[in-house]
Image: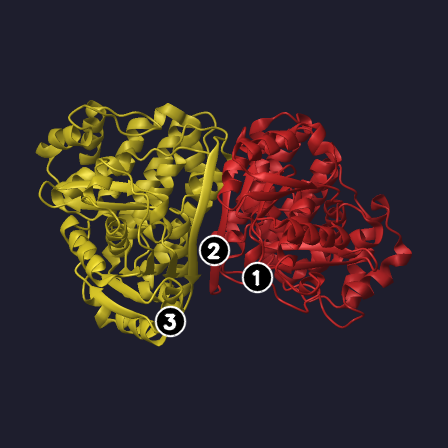
Chain colours: A yellow, B red
Amino acid sequence: MKNFTFQNPTKILFGRGMQAKAGAECARFGKKVLVHYGSERVRQTGLLGEVEASLAAAGVTYLELGGVQPNPRLSLVHKGVEICRTEKIDLILAVGGGSVIDSAKAIAAGVPYAGDVWDFYCGKAVPEKALPVASVLTIPAAGSEASDSSVITREEDSRKYGLTSSCLYPVFSILNPELAFSLPAYQVACGTTDILSHLMERYFTNARPVHLTDGLIEATMRTIIANVPKVLANPQNYDAWAEVMWAGCVAHNNLLDTGRIGDWASHGIEHELSAKYDVAHGAGLAVVFPAWMRYVYRHDMARFNRFAVEVWGVRADYFDPEATALAGIAALKGFLVSIGMPANLAQLGARAEDIPEMARLATGGGKWTLGNFVKLDEKAVEAIFRLAAE
Amino acid sequence: MKNFTFQNPTKILFGRGMQAKAGAECARFGKKVLVHYGSERVRQTGLLGEVEASLAAAGVTYLELGGVQPNPRLSLVHKGVEICRTEKIDLILAVGGGSVIDSAKAIAAGVPYAGDVWDFYCGKAVPEKALPVASVLTIPAAGSEASDSSVITREEDSRKYGLTSSCLYPVFSILNPELAFSLPAYQVACGTTDILSHLMERYFTNARPVHLTDGLIEATMRTIIANVPKVLANPQNYDAWAEVMWAGCVAHNNLLDTGRIGDWASHGIEHELSAKYDVAHGAGLAVVFPAWMRYVYRHDMARFNRFAVEVWGVRADYFDPEATALAGIAALKGFLVSIGMPANLAQLGARAEDIPEMARLATGGGKWTLGNFVKLDEKAVEAIFRLAAE
């Protein structure tokens, strides 16, 4: 186990009706809130009204800023920064999924910074402080509700970069599984593929032994695998949604990183797909991750055997570990297809002729490698895209 | 899953050499620290010197208060409260195991309170604030290093009560597995039995479904079961100690309670043993817990089957769930005996003739019941003590 420092200050309020507590929680941080959201769906469902009534009841005034899109855009972040400065906002309350929360975090980091907040994303500067951010989560997926990270896309050049800083942990997040009941099935599948991917990125590590976190990650993966089919079959299944929503948060709150270093190559490869085709992040991951596995599994057959047996319930073939490893990868692929994810680049709407360019961009024109479990150069990334095309 | 609120603010600094960071971390909270510890062993091993050098290097002055005993005593807490008030201490740094940390928490709660801190433990008052507490952990066991609770014993009448309050979470805790290398084997066994017990108390719940936390608890139990024999066989096994130490912290930091209600009857029953005979808490639990299981397992055969199969690797007998459940309990018992724990009350040094009195005291003279999974009255507690005597 590697040395580590771990602290996650986010307060989680979990369960039915918890959105009614938003006002009282916000009031602990100030008197004026920016309510940040995506589409008008959150107003139509009544959620925005409930949250705003709770703010008013707690004596908190608020402004609204909607319009966050999937793969949240820098231009709206700039607009949010302006509003927060002009209106002297005390806290940004994101009502939505990971895109809305990521956008809120970007605004929060931008407000006290004299330069352009994009500096943080492209690595030119490091944020030292941020406005407090909080969330009412509507989509179990990105894990942003209890994470220290944010991903933003700059429209002009389709660059999509992430920022990680301890000042980005939300001060509180409200997780009510009922809010996920009305999600479209495809979005559920994309979101839960994202959760599974957060777990797999952490799982595939060269740190050894990491017995405890291996077991915790596997348990969280099994929870997703067991419960996603249930919520797809019956979107009103509160119990199954609760498992998925809490698992999605635990998957990405950094506890499962402790003492190990994750891989994150598949996320890097997928970013090229969502930047180029504006596909859902989860759908891109569903295509990339099994391809990545097929490319790297020989690097650590023991780990891929453990993945097959402990996560997917494959019966180990002790005399043919390669067969066991491949059965695990096949089980992942089968699961993803069964929940409605694309099986290859074509089904995703990506074109084979774009592969060389995407591989070049993903590795900065060959200037850097992706991943920690196995370091991938431009050629390796191209090979993985080719496997993803099959 | 039940509604819950979860927030654990404790910063964990984990790994080799981390005690050197004590000074810089303390300096974030003030300029004057009370270093609280137990026996002089921490001075002899050089740990106290290292920590104090780190404080001095960070410009933090300190006073020492040693002498905490297992089952920490109220009289020393009173003394600590006096010192903190007189000397205007900013933070209490516990260097030791759970007893030292629990004692530090009691002092911390007592300092800003006008009455006797015992009021908090016997339920007469609720703490609203406390001095910051931090720890350098030397014994993986109680989990106090990242918990919101403290257990103190009042010497005059051997009453041992717990206090839980969010103001008791340590602000930081340093976990260096190397510090556990020199622990005597019996203390290792007692401490890790305590960890396993914290997990089992949480595991046996009537909340259902609680898929994610069931899996997380099982993974943590398996980590203890796999690694304790390794540290007993080779006390210098850093990797195995790291697993045990991190598992001991995760076991009790309240994440594994989320959405469920634990049982805690075995802890209540054991408190009578350690109050009466001053035995180690873990040794008492080793005797009580399997007896409790034999008394209650018919209440939820499915859960006891899951415990047997998922935690102990028992092969399920689908046509005889009772046999499967009993095999799980036998496996727990066998494990505890294998690591050097007593098998019954006599081996613990307890007397059968004291059973009725202990059962009476444990239930307040029949005024209350123990446990949530199964509610135990005085008669039930007595029956469990009888099973523990076998």
* Amino acid type, callout 3: Ala
Can you identify the residue that label 1 sits on? Answer: B261
Q: Residue at x 63, y 64 (%)?
A: B372
Give neighbour class at mark 3: few <14, some 14-19, many 20+ (Cα, 10 Å): some
Q: Using the rendered image of the protein, determine whether residue B221 is visible from the camera's viewpoint.
A: no
Can you identify the residue that label 3 sits on? Answer: A20
Mark 1 vs mark 2: which is more N-terminal? 2
Q: Residue at x 77, y 53 (%)?
A: B75
Q: How many marks?
A: 3
Q: Chain of mark 3?
A: A
Give neighbour class at mark 1: few <14, some 14-19, many 20+ (Cα, 10 Å): some
Q: Chain of mark 1?
A: B
Q: Chain of mark 2?
A: B
* Amino acid type, callout 1: Ile
Q: Residue at x 33, y 41 (%)?
A: A332
Q: Secondary structure at mark 1?
A: loop
Q: Nearer the viewer, residue A190 or B244?
A: B244
Q: Secondary structure at mark 2?
A: strand
Can you identify the residue that label 2 sits on? Answer: B7
Q: Position of residue A315 (x, y in %)?
A: 46, 37
Residue B148, quarter of the rendered image: bottom right
Q: Secondary structure at mark 3?
A: helix
- Vertical placement of A173 versus B98: above or below? below
